[in-house]
Image (spheres, coloured by chain):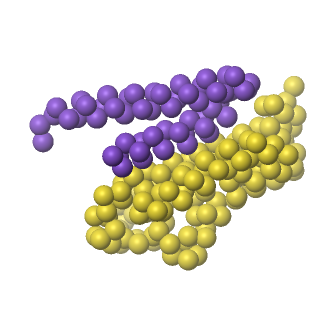
């Protein structure tokens, strides 16, 4: 569980910074931040499942 | 038309590097300072709590392998006074097997590295605002 929470916290903090420095208006920043957050989580979970099936 | 970099712009950039959030505070952008600075501080402190390792030039490696410490050190150094304080108090620089065996050791490393890199972005943002490249 802690692994997932760490990933969520990491994604949230990075999304805040990227959202602010990457766009100009409040709406654009919010959407961009949410997009970054969702991408971090989505790609992280996809990679986790991919690695789960790989034999060690 | 962007203005030429003034002393104030360099000062804002320097302040943003030295104390995360201070560069935007100097410009009166309190919300941005709180969010950017807060994110960097939170990431750095979380990294320390998770048992992450801060990099410096001094270490057990010799020769060219010691150069591998330079890139992560540059990333860590991005947190400015937070890194310097830890360096002065020898906090987070321990290199023991016990620390490395912690479950969250690598998470902590990543948080500490990325905190510095994010602060470099915040520093450039403060500088760009000061020279008129961004609003």
Picture quarter with the N terminus of chain B: top right
> In the image shown, does B112 or B10 lie closer to the viewer?
B112
B121 with respect to B72 (left or right): right
The residue at the point 74 percent across, 46 percent down is B33
B94 with respect to B76 (left or right): left
Q: Measured from the top left, where is residue B53 in percent x and y?
A: 43, 63
Say whether residue B78 is visible: no
Q: Measured from the top left, where is residue B57 in percent x and y?
A: 48, 67
Q: From this view, report whether residue A24 is shown above or below residue B122.
A: above
The residue at the point 67 percent across, 22 percent down is A28
> In the image shown, does B99 or B116 lie closer to the viewer?
B99
The residue at the point 76 percent across, 42 percent down is B31
Quadrant of residue B58 within the rendered picture: bottom left
Q: From this view, report whether residue B82 is shown above or below residue B118.
A: below
Quadrant of residue B83 within the rendered picture: bottom right
Say whether residue A39 is visible: yes
Q: From this view, report whether residue B132 is shown above or below residue B49.
A: above
Which residue is the extreme one toward the bottom?
B89
How many labels were placed on the picture? 0
Q: Measured from the top left, where is residue B105 in percent x and y?
A: 36, 59
Q: Measured from the top left, where is residue B38 in percent x and y?
A: 65, 50
Determine the colour of chain B.
yellow
Picture quarter with the C terminus of chain B: top right
Give the chain ID for the purple colour.
A
A48 with respect to B75 (left or right): left
The residue at the point 50 percent across, 56 percent down is B46
């Amino acid at each position: 569980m802690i692994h997932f929470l760490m990933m969520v916290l990491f994604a949230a903090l990075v999304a805040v910074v990227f959202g602010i420095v990457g766009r100009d208006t409040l709406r654009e920043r919010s959407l961009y931040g949410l997009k970054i957050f969702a991408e971090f989580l989505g790609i992280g979970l996809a990679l986790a499942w991919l690695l789960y099936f790989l034999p060690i | 038309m962007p203005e030429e970099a003034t002393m104030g712009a360099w000062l804002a950039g320097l302040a943003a590097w030295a104390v995360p959030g201070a560069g935007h505070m100097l410009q009166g952008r309190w919300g941005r300072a709180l969010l950017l600075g807060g994110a960097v501080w939170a990431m750095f402190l979380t990294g320390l709590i998770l048992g992450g390792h801060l990099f410096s030039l001094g270490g057990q490696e010799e020769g060219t392998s010691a150069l591998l410490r330079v890139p992560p050190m540059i990333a860590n150094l991005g947190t400015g006074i937070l890194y310097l304080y830890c360096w002065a108090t020898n906090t987070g620089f321990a290199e023991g097997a016990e620390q490395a065996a912690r479950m969250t050791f690598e998470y902590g490393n990543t948080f500490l590295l990325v905190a510095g890199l994010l602060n470099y972005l915040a520093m450039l943002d403060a500088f760009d605002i000061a020279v008129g490249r961004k609003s």
